[in-house]
Image (spheres, grey):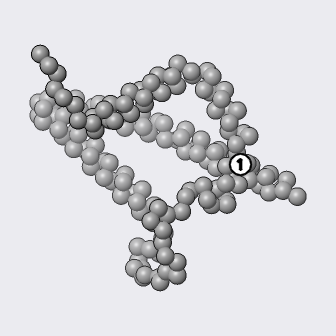
Amino acid sequence: MFESLFEKAEASVENRLGELGNRVLIGIPFIAALGFAAASFSSYANRNYGPEIGNLIVAGGFVLLGFVVALVVKLRKRPIGASFEAKEEPKTEEPSKTGPSFLEDDKVMSIVSAAAPIVLPAMLRTASKNWPLILAAAAGLYVVSRSESAGSTPQSPPQA
C-alpha cells in the first residue's frame, strides 16, 4: 500500500540530490575562477596602492560581493507576487512564540524517513574513511564550545 509512496519519495530525493550534485559540479569552476580573480586583484591593488590600502580594497570588494549575494538569496526566497503586493491577510490562529518545528511537517518527515536508509549507510562509509578529519572537527567544536562557555563566566586575574 505504501510502496508506491516510498518509491515516489525515493525518486524525489534522488532527483533533488542529482540536481544538487549538478549544481555543485557547475559551481566548482566558478569558485576557482573567483579565487584566481581575487588573487589577481589583490596583487594589482597591493602593487598600485600599497599593502594596507590594497587589502582594504579587496576586503571591501568581498563585502560588496557578500551584500549582492545576500540580496539575491533574499529575493529568491520571496514569493514572486510578494514584491508587488503588500497586503496583510488576517490571521485566524494566534502565532506561537517559537513557531512550528521543521520536523513537524508531514512531507519533510516522509522524505527524511524515505531517505534515511539510503543516506545513513553512505554517511557511515564516508565517516569511517575520514575518521581523523571528523575527530579533528569534533575536537575543534569541543574547544570552541568550551572557550565560549569559559568566556561568559567571570574569572579572577592571575596571581603573580
Find residue 8 and report its horizontal and vertical position in percent.
77, 55
Q: Is residue 39 above or below residue 101?
A: above
Q: Residue at x 43, y 81 (%)?
A: 88
Q: Is residue 149 toward the left or the right of residue 87 in the image? A: left
| Residue sitting at the far right | 1
Q: Quadrant of residue 108?
A: bottom right
Report the residue at 44% width, 74% height from top. 82
From the image, which quarter does the C terminus lie in?
Answer: top left
Q: Is residue 10 at least partly visible in the picture?
A: yes
Residue 159 higher or lower than 76, as above or below = above
Image-based side of 53 in relation to 96, left or right: left
Residue 102 lies in quadrant: bottom right
Q: Residue at x 85, y 53 (%)?
A: 3
Quarter of the picture containing the N terminus is bottom right
Camera-side residue of 23 and 159? 159
User: Looking at the rendering, which quadrant does residue 74 occupy?
Assistant: bottom left
Q: Is residue 73 found left or right of 42 in the rendered image?
A: right
- According to the image, label 1 marks what residue? 113
- Residue visible at 33% across and 53% down in the picture: 68
**Farthest top residue?**
160
Q: Position of residue 98 (x, y in %)?
A: 47, 62
- Residue 13 visible: no
Amino acid type, callout 1: Ser
Q: Secondary structure at mark 1?
A: helix
Q: How many numbered discs sit on the rendered protein?
A: 1
The front one of 24 and 45 is: 24
Q: Is residue 115 above or below residue 147?
A: below
Q: Position of residue 151 (x, y in %)?
A: 27, 34
